[in-house]
Each structure stands twice: as structure tokens, then as C-alpha cells.
Image (cartoon, helix red, strand yellow):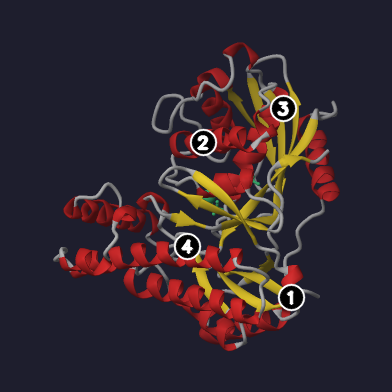
Amino acid sequence: MSVLAPAWTADDGARRARDLLASTLGPEPADGVWAAPGRVNLIGEHTDYNGGLCLPVALPHRTYVAVRRRDDRTVRLSSAQEEGVRTVDLDGVGPAGSPGAVEGWPAYVVGVAWALVAEGLVPAERVTGFDVAVDSCVPYGAGLSSSAALECAVAIALDELWGLGLAADDAGRARLAAACVRAENEVAGAPTGGMDQSASLRAQEARALLLDCRDGSTRQVPFALEAAGLELLVIDTRAPHALVDGQYAERRDSCERAARQLGVTTLREVEDLDAALAALDDPVVQRRVRHVVTEIGRVARFAEELDAGPLDTGRAAALGALMAGSHASMRDDYEISCAELDLAVETATAAGAHGARMTGGGFGGSAIALLPAGQAERVAGAVSAAFAAAGFAAPAFLLAPASAPAARTA
Ligand code: ADP
Ligand code: MG
């Protein structure tokens, strides 16, 4: 049997969500099923809050929501990934830490409804309650953004049920993404840049989404792996995320202090890296700045390679070298890797990957490896064996062809 976790077909996902709606929230039919993908970032880590570049693709793995409109302002929720039925009064929803705070996973759902109102995207009288059943094949907490997949599936559902029409074009989708970011930051209380939600709502099949976090602009970059005889393997290390929250804040803080010291708004404005490093006295801050500035450069070069023409062997090797450089920078300068991520990257590289790197915020989560087509099972086997030998938990795997954005499925 394959070790690669399959993505559900749209029919299968829709059927699961509808069945869950019927079995947990009553037999009346759903108004529809909507789905949104998780994402994986090809390159460009911890660049978002520095006004930099990142390059995510949408996964074929999606979160499905079957939604049924209600006449009142109540939201009832169930998820195949969570216990029990939850009920939330929409009028009582407020930011995390306020009296209207919503406990646990429903915050990602009702937070979107709240944020659509807060962003002025929906007239208050169009806001109705709804019943929603969730099922997903996006792994949780693997750095593949199951949270954004859930938010964006709900956003696209409410966009249609409330008649907003924002999903029809990219500009509207950017506004939905902004509402999802607010839902996650303010209602779920989790810090997040805009990459995950932009990828889930705005990425396209066989394309990577070049996102410029300085001004929010995007560009679709060709990323047709199959046609090039390549595959992208995602390795979910299942490493326990230790100390993540404090470390994220510490990195962000270092970058902000360095920018102030250098007299720039964000590290994106640094043009001469050597001069910037010479102007900083703390060696730790110097390393942090070097990661951010060189990483932004690697994203730009990665996108240029993809723009330049078909992904032949030479170009795949160039992409691989940029991935290797990115990983080393995160391991040595930004210090956000961990033993499991390093082992996954080293093993995949030794097993013949063009390149590999950790992806996501770090301290656990997933790594990616760019492989010649047909090699994924073998490389996954090598990584599993290395993890077993090191006494680590068994990793999980999936393939990540660049896939379609959030949409209605049934
Ligand atoms: P990641 O986004 O990397 O997978 P997060 O910690 O940001 O990890 O988000 C995971 C959280 O999002 C879960 O703990 C849960 O609260 C919520 N969530 C994601 N997917 C689902 C789902 N299918 N059903 C219910 N809640 C979900
Ligand atoms: Mg998340």
C-alpha cells in the first residue's frame, strides 16, 4: 500500500460532509458543499512580516463544508475531526479574550462570519445563522494550514449564501482572504500573516502564487510539475511543536528592532546586506537579518527560474540548490529547524531529491522535497527508515501537485 496520503475526490469529500450534516445536524438537505485547500510554501519563510516574498501552492488536500442556511442567528457546527455538536450565537461573537470569545475550533468558522461583517463586506441584515458540517483530508497542525482551509471553505460558502459575489474575481478573493486573516488573528487568537489564506483562495492549478507581502500584490508563476516529470513530496515530521509561540514572537521582535536600527520600515528595504550587517552589533540579530534578506532573494530567483521556461534537469537542479540554501539559512541563521526536519531534508537529499527544505514556521511541521517523478515512494521509505533508526515518531507523506483554489464542489 502507498504511504502517500491520498487527497479525496470532490465527490467523496462532498458526500462525507453531507453525510455528517445529516447524521449530526438533521436530515434537511444542505444548500451546498464548498471546499478549500491546505497549502505548502515552496520557498520564503518568515518573510511575510518583513514585507518580503513567499511562494505557496494549493494542495490537492481540501477541507469540505456542507452548509445549510438557518432563519435565526444561530450557528450549529460539527466536524469529523472534533467531538460533538457545538452551538454559537452569531450576535455574541467577539474577539479572543473578550466576553464574546469562542472556545476551540468553532472560532475558525464563526470568526469568518464575524470578520465579514467587521470588514464591512456584508450588510448586517443579510447575516443569517447556518448549520455546518466539516470534514477534511488536510492534516492538522502539520504546517499545511488546515486552519486556513477551514476558514476559506466557510468564507466561500458564506460569500454565496449571503450573496456577496466576492469569489467571482481575484480582487474579491483578496478581500475574503483578508477577512479570514482577521478571523484567525482576532477571533481564533492565532498569529498569522496572509500567506495561508491567499494561497487557499487565490492559488491556481499548475501555478505557484508569488505573494509580495509589502503591498499584498500577487503573481501566478508556472509550476507544472507533472509536465516536467517532477514531483513535490511533503514530509510531515509529526515532531511535537515545542516553544513555538515564544520563538515566533522573538524572531518577529528581532526583525522589528533590526529594521528600526537600520532606519527602514521593514527588512525588505535592505539593499546592501553587508552594510546592514556591519551596522548591527548583536551577532544573533545579524544572523536573523541575513536569513530574511537572503531568503527574499532566493524567492525572487526561484520565481525567475520558473518563469524562464520548461523545468528541464538544469532548472530543477537550480531550484533544488535554492531550496538547500533556504534550509541551511533557517537551520543556521534563523535557528527554527529541529532534528526531525534536518533528518528529513538530509535523507531526501541523499536519496536523490533535487533539493529539500523545511517549510512553514519551523520547530516541527513539514519538509518538502523536489523529486524526479516516480521516486516519492522510495524517498518516503528512506525517510521513514531514518526516522525509525533515530527513534523519532513515524512521519507521514503526501504529494503536492499545485492544485485549485477554494470553490463550490456540489
Ligand atoms: P495548521 O493550520 O498548520 O494545520 P493550526 O494550529 O493553525 O494548524 O490549525 C489547526 C486548528 O484549526 C485545529 O486545532 C482546529 O481548531 C482547526 N481546524 C482545522 N481543521 C479543522 C477541521 N477539519 N475541523 C475542525 N477544526 C479544524
Ligand atoms: Mg494554521
Disc 3 and disc 4: Cα gap in Å? 36 Å
Q: Position of residue 223 (x, y in %)?
A: 66, 63
Residue 321 higher or lower than 240, as above or below: below
Disc 4 and disc 2: Cα gap in Å? 24 Å
The kind of residue tagged 3 is Glu
Q: Nearer the viewer, mark 3 or mark 1?
A: 1
The answer to whether any part of residue 340 appears in the image is: no
Disc 1 and disc 4: Cα gap in Å? 23 Å
Quick one: label 4 or label 2, which is nearer the N terminus? 2
Q: Position of residue 331 (x, y in %)?
A: 39, 73
Q: Mark 3: few, some, or many residues within 10 Å (few <14, many ≥20)? A: some
- At x 62%, y 40%, the residue is 152
In which quadrant is the N terminus drawn? bottom right
Disc 3 and disc 1: Cα gap in Å? 38 Å
Disc 1 and disc 2: Cα gap in Å? 36 Å
Quick one: label 2 or label 3, which is nearer the N terminus? 3
Q: Please name the residue that numbered disc 4 is placed on.
A: 300
Q: Please name the residue that numbered disc 3 is placed on.
A: 160
Q: Considering depth in this image, is 370 or 162 the residue closer to the camera? A: 370
Query: Image quadrant of residue 57?
Result: bottom right
Quick one: label 1 or label 4, which is nearer the N terminus? 1
- At x 49%, y 45%, the residue is 194
Q: Mark 2: few, some, or many residues within 10 Å (few <14, many ≥20)? A: some
- At x 21%, y 53%, the residue is 257
Q: Please name the residue that numbered disc 1 is placed on.
A: 229
Give the secondary structure at mark 3: helix
Q: Please name the residue that numbered disc 2 is placed on.
A: 178
Residue 386 higher or lower than 71, as above or below: below
For ligand 1, tell me if the residue under mark 1 lies within 8 Å. Answer: no
